[in-house]
Structures are given as C-alpha cells and as structure tokens.
Image: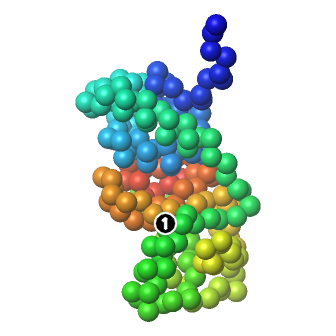
Amino acid sequence: MQDQRPEKPIHKHMVIQEILRLFPGKGELLGQELTNTGLHCVGCGAATFETLLAGMLGHGKTMADVDALVDRLNAIVSQKVDMTTITISDQAATKFLEACKVDGKQGYGLRLEEKPGNCGDFEYVLDFAKQADENDDIFNTPQGIPIYVKRSQRERLLGSSIDYIDGGLMGSGFKVSNPNVVSSCGCGSNHSYR
C-alpha cells in the first residue's frame, strides 16, 4: 500500500533559489535558517542554483543534517503570520527586558522603525522608547512590552516578528522577520519591498 500523506512544500531536491521564490514572505526566515546551517549562498546568490541536497552534501553535511534542515524549513513555511499586528518572541522579550534593566529603562517600550541602509535599501532600527510619539501606532504584546511604530511605516511593518537569535555566523542579536520584504542583501541587515 502506498503512503498517502501529502508531500511537504519543501523537499531536498528543490533548488535553493526556487524555495526563496516560492515563499517570498518567508524569505528572511528561510535565508537565516539556511545561513545558520552553513549554506552562505543565500545573500550573495553564489550557489542558489544548487539543490538543498547538493548544497548540504557539498558543505560536508550528512543525510540526517539534510533531513533536519528540510523539516526546519517546512516548519518555517507552515507558520501562520498575523498581518494585523507586530509581535515579539518570548526570548526577544526577555532579552529586551534584561537590556531595559541594565540601562535603567524599566517600563520603556520598544521602538521599531526603518531607515535607509548601506546597500541602498532599508534597515531596521530597534530602540528604547519611554512613550509613543503623536504619530505612532502602538502594538501591545502578550509580554507587556508596547511596540511603537511610525504610522508612515505601519503598512510595511505589519506582520513583522521580532526575535532574538543566539549565535550563528551573524552573531547574537535581535532579528526582525517581515513577510512584506521580497529581498535582502548578503549582509543580512538590509531589505527591500515590491
């Protein structure tokens, strides 16, 4: 009897470039996962024509590593995004509250904004904010941290999630994942829209 389970959207024989093209709203998260795994071709496009399998084996990874990566990539593309708000992960909230305590800014909110980046696109800026400005929208989070966003940037930032990444080649720090972004540069800091 044949297995009747539906095929997962991402499989090991897919070309990396095709994965990124098929899931543009997840491109930043997928790219980060590929980079953390050791496939650095994502930002520069050097070998995005390879399949996941070829790329992983070419970097000395095992079939178990390939299968684990495919599972993580499928988990990313299956995550639902709430396009009506901006969220922060529990880990990022904890790190933000720790930073507030160290800097004597308990009770502050988190400001999320964009500014022109070095690669000609945009980059995210996260900062402490004592209160909202008159032109801000406020997104209240389950962790009790208000996120302040300029009204003029709201549409581009809706659906974004703020996370904290430990380690990896890009180091530890806050990471914004925005489903509205269609491309980001090799440095991982800059992004552009349609």
Residue that lies at the very extreme toward the left in this rendered image: 60
Whether residue 44 is situated above or below residue 85 in the rendered picture: above
Q: Position of residue 14 (x, y in %)?
A: 49, 24
Residue where numbered disc 1 is placed: 91
Mark 1 nearby-residue class (10 Å; few <14, some 14–19, many ≥20): some
Whether residue 29 is situated above or below residue 60 in the rendered picture: below
Q: Quadrant of the N terminus?
A: top right
Residue that lies at the very extreme toward the front in this rendered image: 1
Q: How is the image coloured?
A: rainbow
Q: Position of residue 77 (x, y in %)?
A: 59, 41
Whether residue 99 is situated above or below residue 50 in the rendered picture: below
Check disc 1 and give the amino acid type: Gln
Q: Position of residue 57 (x, y in %)?
A: 31, 26
Q: Residue at x 33, y 53 (%)?
A: 168
Q: Residue at x 48, y 73 (%)?
A: 94
Residue 127 visible in rendering = yes
Give left or right: position of 148 versus 102. Answer: right
Give left or right: position of 172 versus 78. Answer: left
Residue that lies at the very extreme toward the right in this rendered image: 84
Q: Position of residue 45 (x, y in %)?
A: 39, 37
Q: Secondary structure at mark 1?
A: helix
- Count of numbered tags: 1
Quarter assignment of residue 95? bottom left
Residue that lies at the very extreme toward the top in this rendered image: 1
Q: Residue at x 62, y 15 (%)?
A: 3
Quarter assignment of residue 143? bottom right
* Pick the front one: 191 or 40: 40
Residue 116 visible in rendering = no
Q: Residue at x 55, y 86 (%)?
A: 108
